[in-house]
Amino acid sequence: MNKKIFLIIIFLVIITTIAISLGSSLLNNNKDGQFINIFSKAKLVEIYECSPHELIATYKSKDDIEKLIKNLNVEKWYICEKELEDAKKYVIKLYQKPNKTLLKNQLKDIGTIAIYNSGEYVDFNDGKTNITFKTNKDISSLFNQINRIESI
């Protein structure tokens, strides 16, 4: 009798662990998808170098913004905790077309992406959520190649 109870408890613990890990995975995938969705909605992307604070590139066309997303390899980023303290090197600001409450020429700020010196981590902040991602490559090196004020 005791053996049956013990096996039932082990079975329940295993099922609970699987359910929790599956739920956590689905939550992380939803945040990833939400981030990519916000990034792809951008109608204007500005890239700033942090020190000195200087605008280094502007992307306005849908094709160029999609190419930037592809070059950053955003689909491969995953949510994580930042393992090291690092200074911000670049900031990407995302803007969307105005809605009815904004003026026609005014753009809505939909998010900011901070890229750190190491290029391994980025923070995304949309005003409601702050998410840290680990990148699969040194993306800060991509911005080192941008000509100063590359307006596309």
Image (cartoon, grey):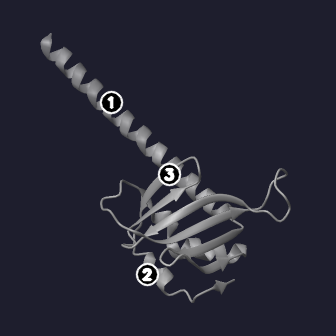
Kindly report the distance in space between the C-alpha atoms of the residues bearing marks 1 and 2. Answer: 44 Å
Question: Which amino acid does the dot numbered 3 rest on?
Answer: Asn
The residue nearer to you, when weighing 29 against 2, is 29
Specify the quadrant that holds the N terminus. Answer: top left
The residue nearer to you, when weighing 10 against 109, is 109
The residue nearer to you, when weighing 111 against 103, is 103
At numbered mark 2, what does the secondary structure look like: helix, strand or loop? helix
Mark 1 vs 3: CB contact within 8 A = no
Q: Is residue 9 left or right of residue 70?
A: left
Specify the quadrant that holds the C terminus. Answer: bottom right
**Residue position marked by numbered label 3 in the rendering:** 130
The x, y position of residue 142, in whole percent, is: 48, 81
Kindly report the distance in space between the C-alpha atoms of the residues bearing marks 3 and 2. Answer: 23 Å
Label 1 or label 2, whichever comes before in sequence order? 1
* Mark 2 crowd level (few <14, some 14–19, many ≥20, 10 Å Cα): few
Quadrant housing residue 112: bottom right
The x, y position of residue 106, in whole percent, is: 79, 62
Residue in the image at 38% along x and 34% along y: 19
Label 1 or label 3, whichever comes before in sequence order? 1
